[in-house]
Image (tube, rainbow, N blue to C red):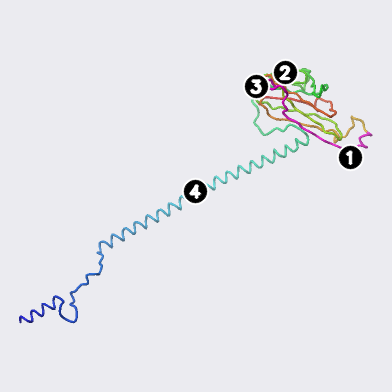
Amino acid sequence: MAQGAVSFSGVAEGIVGPYPPVFVVDSQARYIPLEGRRRWRGFSRQALHVLVALALFGMVLEAGCIIHLYSRTRDLVSIDHTALQLKSKLLKGHKESEENNEILVGITRSPNPRETEHKPTAHLTGIGQLENGVVMWESNDNSLSALKHKMDYKDGKLGVQQEGYYYVYSKVHFIEECSVFKHYVWRMTQAYSKPLQLMKANRYHCPSQKSRQQNSQQSFQQTPHQNILNSYLGGVFLLSSGDKIYVTVNNGTLKSGAEDNFMGAFMI
């Protein structure tokens, strides 16, 4: 019995016998407890929920940005369309004014009489004579087409009494064949010893031989409109008190008439 006990004990310790006993466990095998697996699954689900929420938030944010960009683009397109319409109208009016040499008046609100009643304004018409190329305007204060307010006139020069930005303009009608007609607007100021050229225009017209033969049979009063040219100058300038503005022309026969020739300035 003692030997059998020893033999059984040897079998129990795994020393003797061809097969390992059923209660022998491999010590290298890994085992994850059930509680750990449940925790891992819960963490995975939470992470998935967070990712889905972030994806939905990104989609909502992108949709909002697209809607905002679309609204801004629609407004810009509307503004551009309105600007193009206004530009086309102004260009059309400017083209017509260039053909007729008229002052282009933009789309503005009606002026307030209180805002304009104290601003310097002058409008001189007609041509008396030329002195060294300087146009001498009619200085008759009783003329219906002439206007002077807070500005003086002497020897063909319009005097500025108040400093500010002025729109200065001049228009003349002339007859000149095959020669350059020169139209200038000058400024005399105490800051410079010589006059400053503000604006200029050079016009050239040479009629054909057929047109000359037709015009030779007609008098000056019956000269066709195509042979009477005109030149218009206008611009905004900063003028100081004491400045003088005047107009000169060269190489041309000016057409008389208060409505045909004028010069003026007004503070803006």
Q: Is residue 62 above or below residue 93?
A: below
**Which corner quadrant of the image does residue 179 belong to?**
top right
The picture places residue 100, in percent across and down from the top left corner, at: 78, 34
Q: Quick one: label 4 or label 1, which is nearer the N terminus?
A: 4
CA distance separating discs 2 and 3: 14 Å
Tag 1: Cα neighbours inside 10 Å, few (<14), some, or many (≥20)?
Answer: few
CA distance separating discs 3 and 1: 49 Å
Q: Quick one: label 3 or label 1, which is nearer the N terminus?
A: 3
Q: Residue at x 86, y 37 (%)?
A: 206
| Front label number (2 vs 4) | 2
| Front label number (2 vs 1) | 1
Q: Is residue 69 above or below residue 128?
A: below
Q: Which residues are magenta?
A: 189-217
User: What amino acid does circle 3 point to?
Assistant: Glu
Q: Quick one: label 4 or label 3, which is nearer the N terminus?
A: 4
Q: Which residue is mark 4?
A: 65
Q: Which residue is mark 2?
A: 152
Q: Is residue 244 above or below residue 176?
A: above
Q: Are marks 4 and 1 in contact (CB under 8 Å)?
A: no
Label 2: which secondary element = strand
The picture places residue 131, in percent across and down from the top left corner, at: 82, 21
Q: Are marks 3 and 1 in contact (CB under 8 Å)?
A: no
Q: Quick one: label 2 or label 3, which is nearer the N terminus?
A: 2
CA distance separating discs 2 and 1: 44 Å
Label 1: which secondary element = loop
In the visual, does 153 lie left or right of 7? right
In the visual, does 73 lie left or right of 120? left
Tell whether position 68 is magenta: no
Q: Residue at x 73, y 21 (%)?
A: 158
**Which corner quadrant of the image does residue 214 belong to?**
top right
